Image (tube, helix red, strand yellow):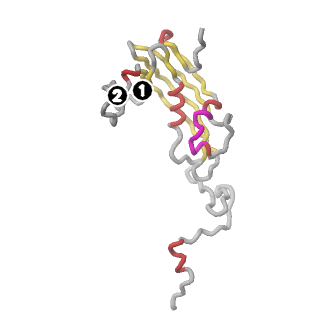
Amino acid sequence: MVKEAPYTVLVRDLPTHRRFEVPPKLVSEWLKGLPMRDALGAPDADPEAGDGVAELDLYADGTHAFASGTFKGGLTVACSRCVNPVRLPIDEKLLVTFLPPSEMPKDEDDAEAEEGAEVTDGDLDVFPFDGERIDLEPLFREQFVLSVPYAPLCREDCKGLCPQCGIDRNSATCTCEKPMDPRLAALKGLKLPS
């Protein structure tokens, strides 16, 4: 008998309540390549990458399957100003629909695509499944990737790094002067009559 992947649920076992844990090693793998993650210079199997726990109720209705519950955890990325680690919490309510591939919504830009199932704005999470097993890994990966903001901050008043010497302005000060605007450099030696 084939052993199922840790985030796979067989449709024949539905309805069911399941708890899934996502370890740091997997989070590190999923976030590899994201600039705010790579800026930390963390090892590939970073134990501080993040983790998560999903508590889900799964059930089926005809050819569709559904999952509802919560996803809680966190992940670590670099602050966009000082590049220090920032722990971002994740606390999401999940309501997910699993559709057969033939019913998945098509891109509006693809004019030649066949008509797919109509999905409203309220149907934010729609994933394909083969009718026999539900793979929850793409859902969990999405929770981590979408939790990384465009410019994460360690705190709202983060002073960042000095552009001249690179010192962290949150923990130390430097004597660097703000560079002169190159457009005004020609006026530096100008003396005005008094």
Element carrying mark 1:
strand
Residue 126: give its label: 1
Mark pair 2, 1: CA separation: 9 Å
- The kind of residue on which mark 1 rests is Val
The residue carrying pointer 2 sits among few (fewer than 14), some (14 to 19) or many (20 or more) residues within 10 Å by Cα, namely few
Image location of residue 116, percent across then percent down: 33, 25
**Residue at screen point 33% across, 37% down:** 109
- Viewed as shown, does residue 66 lie left or right of 121? right
Image location of residue 162, percent across then percent down: 63, 60
Query: Label 2 belongs to which residue?
Result: 119
Residue 25 is a magenta residue = no
Looking at the rendering, which quadrant does residue 32 occupy?
top right
Element carrying mark 2:
loop
**Residue at screen point 59% across, 11% down:** 2
**Residue at screen point 54% across, 31% down:** 141
Magenta stretch in the rendered image: 27-37
